[in-house]
Image (cartoon, rainbow, N blue to C red):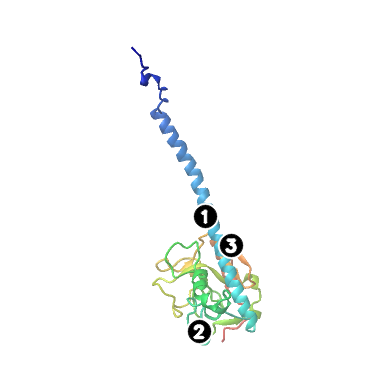
Amino acid sequence: MKHYPNLLRSQRPLGRAFTLIELLASIAVIAILAAILIPVVSSTIERGRSVQCIGNLKMWASAIQSYSLDNGNEIYWYAHSDGDGNWISSGGPYRDYFGTDYRQAPQLIEEYRRCPGDDEDHVAGYAFVLPSYDDGSGGVGARFGSRTKLNAGDIANPADFLLITDAVYGSNGDISAGRGALGIENMIKPIMDGTRGQRVRHQGHANVLFADFHIGSHTYEDFEENGDRWMVLQGVTNSP
């Protein structure tokens, strides 16, 4: 009579199961690692958004500079001086200076006027700042009578003169040229329902394009300390 070995006995013993304490310890280690890695990943993502934002501002700098060189050093900000009104959605006088195919301009402008760090459904992620001739008389999205352009030669210190900055404008899904002037004090402190104003959305900094076409990264404190100087045209009279 043949004898067959017990198959169950021939199997290797199963590995020892985790105890509850070991399982909890493993979960704790995973939680600690997650707590360390998540901020690092978030910071890396935000740095990438800031880099993309700077890229957007560089595109605007290129368009504005090219337009200015072709048009007697003129720089437009919020509206046309010929009465065409708001141009932020279409790109206005700068629309022919984005890309090589003018048909792509609307899509490019739509992309470049929104900051990648603005994750809310705002009309625009940037403010085209109206420079003031006196302390605090201009601001985000403002229109200053018929004088909606200036000559670059009128800017005494281009490196200190703000053109475009991280901000939010538009509470009703539109941007209107007649919404009124917002002073620099309102620009750096969100007003109304919080949909208009300066935004330091890049790890506590806002990216800024200056009139010499360099781009800086500044905090609220920088705006509070330098905002009036960045917004005032020295030696230029308040007249069209």
Residue at far top of view: 1
Q: Earlier in the sequence, mark 1 or mark 2?
A: 1
| x then y, percent, for residue 158 | 64, 73
- The residue wearing badge 1 is 45
Q: Residues within 10 Å of mark 1 (few under 14, many from 20)?
A: few
At x 48% / y 43%, what residue is drawn? 35
Judge from the rendering whether residue 177 lies leftward or rightward of residue 97; answer left or right: left
For mark 1, give the secondary structure. Answer: helix
Please count the marks in the image. Answer: 3
Which quarter of the figure has residue 225? bottom right
- The residue wearing badge 3 is 217
Residue at far left of view: 1
Q: Earlier in the sequence, mark 1 or mark 3?
A: 1
Q: Amino acid at mark 3?
A: Ser
Q: Is residue 162 visible?
A: no
- Dot 2 and dot 3 residues touching (CB under 8 Å): no
- The residue wearing badge 2 is 145
Q: Residues within 10 Å of mark 3 (few under 14, many from 20)?
A: some
